[in-house]
Image: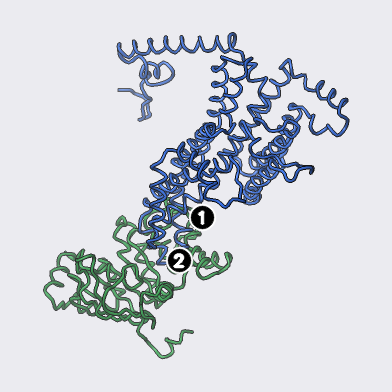
Chain colours: A green, B blue
């Protein structure tokens, strides 16, 4: 089905020497990362390490000032058409869900497919129902976001992102704003998504999820990638002191 | 301790019922009791005198004798049927909307019907009216061609009452008609203007210049047109103020700040005197249009600031989420930002429109005969000298009724939109 799959694995995201400043503050200091199709990469690190900022540069929610970002063969430039082409390849899930409160769950999911992809309402709603079944909440389709629990809202947000049929999914601390008993339902959906072959970058501190699902883990601190490797390497044999310290703090 | 099996206790007796409420709110301490009694005495004195005056001393005939003037001003009496026809359109749409939408609009339809019924009763009771006798006399004198013109107010009111009821009956529960009804309201606005204005000189609908529009009719036209035009204008100005294009941004800021820094009266004078200077000579615009332009420019600036408040209250996460699913800037504004921002500013916007509605009275100073202007011209007649009390009370009552209706509608809309949302 996909040309890329025939020739085997290809590079979906290539970030090379990405720099970013907020005014004078240097928040990304030359981040380079290549993600292959079907790969699940977990990015972790202390707060302020630039991990959220980095994944937000991949779909241009933050502009990078130096370096190159290439998504599925399209280089990110200042051209608005380029940015739109890339954004349609990427789905994103936010810490605070960011569902549209004035629209029902169904409308949240069908909005972009109908207005951007120009699908008919029937087609969009059919796919939305399929996605809601996939994330396990088809019965909530006609409620408003505020009527749902946090876990349900985040699952709707995942369905909304998937509705545009992206090739890549970015997760920006998707479980950090959730009550503990709701984290699992979101992680289950993410695990299922990873097993289906989706290319994913997840900023998360859910180390159980990372251990069982991630192909690769990336530790960031101070705007740089300090260390990367498979979960076994990171958990069992971390090379850097900062990685060891951080892991010891969060794994207790 | 009680020995009942339930573990929930009823509230103490003193906090319940009328006695409890009175005790808590009016007679809780000795000084509150004194305050209550003094206030009661004061209210009683004022109200009783007002009521006695209204029922005995007041000469309400100044209102009844000039009712047509108050309603339509110097509009030609033989053409007043056009105004009645417009009212029929409004009644029909109101009835249909009450059926299709229910809720607040149904309440409004009930109010409207009650108003019609009251007016019918008053009309039939009024001695000088004898409406049907006058009608038959006029018909006898003028022949069948006078039929339209001579239809008495009572008949028109009855027709309107019937149209509200009929509209409601036909449309009740038909939610699919809603979109079409909104369109019909917009169309009716243009039909109204066309119908009142007319065209040509010796046609079936001769042109009636806006200088002949007056009374409540003119007040409504000023308010409705200004509101309808200033709303989109204000939204555009608010969006322009946040634009990334410096020229647009600076223009919008200048416009908003300049207009907000000037009193409405000044703007009205300026549009009366200066607008004709700027426009090419052959383009003649009348007083009413100029006044409407002034009010629209003025209200749009305030509207823009209201909307800006709403726009600023939208979390950036909303815009990021819209961008992330692939919406461009225009769609993000149209589908995500504006619907939420406008909902947030409903109370402020309705407040603005209420004050605009009342500010239409300022048009009297540029020689327009809207409701207050008619009131003053009525008071200038020698037979009605010194009846300020009656006239101004009547005008105040009319303004209150419509302002309150707007305020009421806004509360209901807020409630309806707030359900199940954040």
Q: Is residue B318 above or below residue B386?
A: below
Q: Nearer the viewer, residue B318 or B419?
A: B318
Q: Are marks 2 and 1 in contact (CB under 8 Å)?
A: no
* Residue at 59% in and 36% down: B220
Depth-wise, is mark 2 or mark 1 nearer the camera? 2
Q: CA distance from mark 2 to mark 1?
A: 22 Å
Q: Secondary structure at mark 1?
A: loop
Q: Is residue A69 above or below residue A137?
A: below
User: Most extreme residue toward the bottom, as rendered?
Assistant: A7
* Residue at 42% in and 86% down: A4
Q: Nearer the viewer, residue B260 or B334?
A: B260
Horizontal side, residue B15 vs residue B107: left or right: left
Q: Nearer the viewer, residue B248 or B315?
A: B248
User: Most extreme residue toward the left, as rendered?
Assistant: A241
The residue singled out by tag 2 in the image is B327
The residue singled out by tag 1 in the image is A142
Q: Nearer the viewer, residue B299 or A58?
A: B299
* Residue at 57% in and 22% down: B394
Q: Is residue B412 above or below residue B9?
A: below
Horizontal side, residue B397 vs residue A176: left or right: right
């Amino acid at each position: 089905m996909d040309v890329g799959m025939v020739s085997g694995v290809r590079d979906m995201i290539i970030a090379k020497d990405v720099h970013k400043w907020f005014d004078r503050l240097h928040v990304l200091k030359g981040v380079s990362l290549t993600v292959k199709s079907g790969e699940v990469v977990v990015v972790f690190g202390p707060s302020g390490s630039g991990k959220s900022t980095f994944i937000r540069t991949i779909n241009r929610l933050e502009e990078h000032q130096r370096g190159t970002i290439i998504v599925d063969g399209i280089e990110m430039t200042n051209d608005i058409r380029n940015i739109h082409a890339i954004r349609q390849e990427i789905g994103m899930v936010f810490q605070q869900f960011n569902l549209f409160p004035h629209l029902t769950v169904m409308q949240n999911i069908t909005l972009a497919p109908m207005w951007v992809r120009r699908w008919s309402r029937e087609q969009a709603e059919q796919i939305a129902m399929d996605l809601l079944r996939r994330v396990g909440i088809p019965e909530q389709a006609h409620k408003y976001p505020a009527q749902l629990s946090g876990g349900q809202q985040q699952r709707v947000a995942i369905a909304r992102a998937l509705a545009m049929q992206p090739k890549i999914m970015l997760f920006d601390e998707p479980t950090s704003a959730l009550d503990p008993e709701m984290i699992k339902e979101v992680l289950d959906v993410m695990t299922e998504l990873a097993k289906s072959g989706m290319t994913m970058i997840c900023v998360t501190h859910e180390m159980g999820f990372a251990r069982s699902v991630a192909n690769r883990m990336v530790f960031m601190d101070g705007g740089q990638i300090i260390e990367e490797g498979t979960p076994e390497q990171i958990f069992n044999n971390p090379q850097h002191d900062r990685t060891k310290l951080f892991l010891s703090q969060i794994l207790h | 301790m009680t020995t009942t099996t339930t573990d929930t206790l009823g509230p103490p007796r003193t906090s319940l019922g009328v006695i409890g409420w009175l005790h808590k709110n009016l007679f809780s301490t000795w000084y509150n009791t004194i305050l209550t009694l003094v206030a009661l005495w004061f209210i009683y004195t004022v109200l009783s005198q007002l009521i006695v005056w209204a029922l005995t001393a007041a000469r309400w005939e100044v209102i009844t004798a000039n009712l047509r003037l108050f309603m339509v001003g110097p509009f030609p009496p033989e053409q007043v049927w056009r105004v009645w026809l417009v009212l029929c359109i409004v009644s029909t749409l109101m009835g249909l909307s009450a059926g299709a939408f229910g809720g607040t609009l149904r309440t409004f339809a009930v109010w409207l019907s009650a108003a019609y019924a009251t007016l019918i009763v008053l009309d039939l009771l009024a001695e000088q009216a004898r409406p049907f006798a006058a009608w038959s006399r006029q018909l006898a004198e003028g022949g069948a061609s006078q039929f339209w013109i001579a239809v008495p107010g009572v008949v028109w009111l009855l027709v309107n009452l019937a149209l509200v009821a009929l509209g409601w009956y036909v449309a009740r529960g038909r939610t699919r008609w809603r979109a079409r009804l909104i369109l019909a309201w917009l169309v009716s606005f243009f039909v109204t203007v066309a119908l009142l204005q007319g065209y040509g000189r010796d046609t079936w609908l001769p042109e009636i210049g806006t200088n002949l529009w007056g009374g409540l009719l003119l007040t409504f036209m000023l308010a409705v047109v200004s509101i309808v035009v200033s709303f989109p204008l204000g939204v555009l100005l608010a969006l322009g103020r946040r634009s990334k294009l410096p020229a647009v941004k600076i223009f919008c800021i200048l416009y908003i700040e300049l207009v907000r820094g000037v009193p409405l009266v000044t703007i009205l004078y300026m549009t009366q005197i200066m607008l004709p200077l700027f426009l090419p000579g052959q383009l003649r615009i009348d007083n009413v249009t100029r006044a409407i332009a002034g009010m629209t420019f003025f209200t749009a600036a305030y509207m823009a600031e209201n909307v800006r408040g709403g726009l600023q209250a939208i979390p950036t996460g909303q815009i990021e989420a819209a961008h992330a699913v692939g919406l461009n800037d225009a769609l993000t504004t149209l589908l995500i930002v504006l619907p939420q921002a406008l909902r947030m500013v409903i109370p402020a916007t309705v407040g603005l429109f209420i004050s605009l509605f009342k500010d239409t009275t300022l048009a009297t100073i540029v020689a327009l005969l809207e409701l207050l202007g008619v009131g003053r011209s009525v008071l200038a007649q020698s037979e009605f000298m010194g009846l300020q009390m009656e006239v101004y009370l009547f005008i105040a009552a009319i303004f209150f009724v419509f302002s309150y209706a707007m305020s009421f509608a806004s509360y209901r809309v807020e409630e309806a939109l707030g359900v199940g949302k954040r």
